[in-house]
Amino acid sequence: MVETPGRRPRLSFEQIIRLLSNSLFFLLLGFLLLFVAYWNSGTVPAWMTLINIVLVALLLVGVGGLLLAGDSRRVDQFYRFCSSGLFFIALGMVFLFLAHWSMGSAHAGMTFVLVVLGVAVLLYGTGTQGMGEFKTDAAAAKYNVAIAGGAGVLAFCVAFGIIEYSPKMRDAFQTEKKFVRLLIKSVDGSSNIPSYAPTFEIDGVAIPAARRGNLVEVFVPYVTSELVSSSTARQAKTNDASPPKIVATPDDNVCKDAGNLEAFAKLHGDAVTKTIYAIFYRVEAKDTLKPKEETAFRVKLDQPLFDKRGGGSDYPIYPVQMCVNLQAKDSATTVISQAGSALTAATGKEVPQNVPNLIFNQIGVQ
Amino acid sequence: VTSKIVGLLAAFLLVLSGTMTPAMISGDVCSAYRNVIEGGSATAVPIVPDRLLTNWREALSCLVPIIGGLNASVTSPKFSPETQSKFLSATGAVRAIMTRLSLSDEKLKTATEEQRRNQDTLNDFIKAFRGLDNLDVTSMLTFGARSDNYDMRLNSVLILGNVVDNQTVCVPLTHLNDPELDKTDYGINGRTNLLGIIAVVAPWALKQNFESIKATRDSIFQSIRKNDPNLKQTYALLDNVQARLDVQTQGTNKSEEVPSNWRGDCKKYIEQYRLKPENTRNLQY
C-alpha cells in the first residue's frame, strides 16, 4: 500500500487483485454460470441474458466505486467483510433463495445449478473460510486463496458437467414415459373439430389429448430408448454404407403447407415410428360433417427436431402438424348434383330438350 | 329549458337515424363475420360458427363481399397463406349454407305442398347469391377452382358450379384461355374443374357465351396430347361440354345476345386479366 501524507490512501495493485479474487470473482463466476444455465435451458434468449449480466456487472462496479472511492481503509474493511464466513454464508443463502424463488417458472436444470452454487458457497463460508482466517502470514494467505479458488472451480466444474451432460444424466435415471405433443388441426374451413369427441390410442392403449379451439393436442408417449437422440447417434446408425433414410412421402394426414412439408422432409427415416389410431365421434348434429371418422397418424420420434419452445424440453411439440378432414363427402355430391338447376331459358326462348347429364358429378372435383 | 334540450336531442337522433344507410347497418352486422374470418392465421383456418349462419340471407350478404374483397390480393392461383385462410373460411361457410339447403331440398321432395311453402331452397340461395355477386367474386372463385390447394378447389367448384350463369361465365372462360393454366399438375386439375363449370352453362348459353364456350372447347381439344391417360377426365369433360352445347337449337338461348352491359363487364375483365391478344380470340365479347 502506498501512503501519502495529507492525502487519502490509494489502492495498490495487490489490493485490487485481492479484492477481485474474493467478492467480484465469485459474483461474476456465479453470473457466468447463470448465463450458461439460462442459455442452455432456452427459456431466455442468450443476448438478453448477456445484456442483463453486463448491466448488473456495471452496476456492481459503479456501486463499488462509489462506496470505496479509492479509500484503502474502506477497501480493507470491504475485503475483510468479503473474506468473512458470514459473507459467503449470506451469498450462499441468496443463491438458495433464488433457486427457491424461481423454482416454479425456471427449468429444473436451472434450479439445480442454483442449488449447487448456493450449497457450495455456503459450505465454503462455513468451513474453508474459517481455516483461511486462522492464518495471517503471506504464505498461509496464498494457501487460503488456493482453497477458495479450488472450491469455486469445483462448483464451476460440477455446474458445467450438469449443464453439458444433463440429457445423458436424465436419460440414465429416467425410465418413465415422456411425451411429445402432436398438434392436429383442420385447414379446410369446414371441419369443426369442437363438434367431435376424439379418442386416441397406441396399440390399444388410450393416450391423453386436449382440445384447444379448433385443434387437438395429443400427448404421444415414448421412452428414451426409442429416440434417435443426437446427431452422433444418427451418424453411427447411418455409417453402415447405406445413405440416411429420409421419410420420402408425407401421409395424407400431414398438413400440406410449405413450412410443414419442409419440417416433414427433415425427419429421419431411422427414427422409431409411433402410429396413433384416432376416432372422431361427432357430438353435434351437422349435416356437413361426417358422423364418425377413423384415421391414423404416424409420428417419427426424431428428438433433435422436437420443438422445445413453449413447452420446454419436458413437453416438446412435434415439428410436423397433422390435418384432419371431417367434411361429409355425400354433402358435397348432393350440392354439385344440383349444379345448373337454377339456369333458365331467356324470355321467349325454348327450353333445350334431352340435355345430357353433367358428368362432373361422376368425376368429382379434381 | 330542459324540454328544449330533450327536444333538440330527439331531433338530432332522428336526423342521425335517417342518415344511416343500409351499408352502415350491414357494416355493423358484417363485422362479426369479418372478425371471425380475418381472425385466423397463416396456419389456422377459422371456422364461421353456426350461430352466424342461422340467418343465411344475412350471412350471405356479408360473406359474398368478403370473398370479392380478397380479389385485390390475388393475381395467381397460388394464394398467400393469409388469403388462403380467409378464402377457405368464407367459402367453407357458404358451402355449409348450401349443404344445409341442399339436404333440405332432398327432404322436401317427399313433403306435402303445405310443408314446402315458406321453406327456403337452394334455388333461393342461388338467386340471392347472384343478386350480390359480381365479376370480382366470380374471379376469386375461379382462381380458387384452379388453385394449388384441394380444399379451395372443392369449395370453389361447389359454389361456382351452382351460381355461374350467363353474366359470369366469361370469367372461367378467360382463365381457360390462359396459356399458363396447364403448366402445373394443379393447373391441369383446375382446367378440368373449369370445364365442368362451363359445361353447366353450355345448354343455356346466350349467343356470345355459346360461341366463346365452343371456341374455347375446340381450342383446348386441339392443343392437348391425344391418348394421354392423365388427361382422361379432361377429354370426358370436353365431350360433355360439346354434347351439352349440341342440344341448343335456333330457338334456344344461343340466338339471344348477351346484354351489352354484361359484355362490357366481361371485356373489362379480360383486359384486366392481361391475356395476350392471340389468347383472346376465343372470347367473343
Image (cartoon, coloured by chain):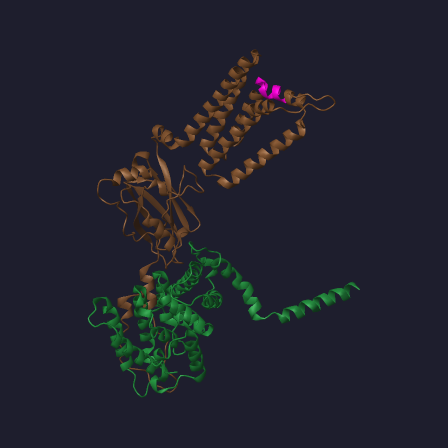
Residue A34 can be seen in this image: yes
Q: Any idea which chain is the green one in this picture?
A: B
| Image side of residue B37 versus residue A200, left or right | right
Residue B60 in view here: no
Q: Nearer the viewer, residue A231 or A221?
A: A231
A75 relative to B53, above or below? above
Asked if residue A246 is positioned above or below residue B207 in the image, the reply reads: above
Any idea which chain is the brown one in this picture? A
Compared across the picture, whether A91 is left or right of B141 comes to right
Among the 4 quarters of the image, the one containing residue B207: bottom left
Q: Residue at x 50, y 32 (%)?
A: A32
Is residue A136 shown above or below A284?
A: above
Q: Is residue A25 magenta?
A: no
**Can residue A82 be found in the magenta stretch?**
yes
In the picture, the quarter occupied by the N terminus of chain B is bottom right
Seen at 35% across and 76% down, the residue is B173
How far from the left and from the top, in percent, is residue A148?
51, 20
Q: Residue furthest right?
A: B1
Q: Nearer the viewer, residue B77 or B118?
A: B77
- Front residue of B119 and A110: A110
Horizontal side of A22 relative to A210 (left or right) equals right
Return the x and y of residue A343 as percentages of the image width and height: 36, 77
List x then y, in percent, for residue A16.
59, 25
Q: Main secondary structure of the magenta part?
A: helix
What stretch of residues is rendered in magenta? A78-86
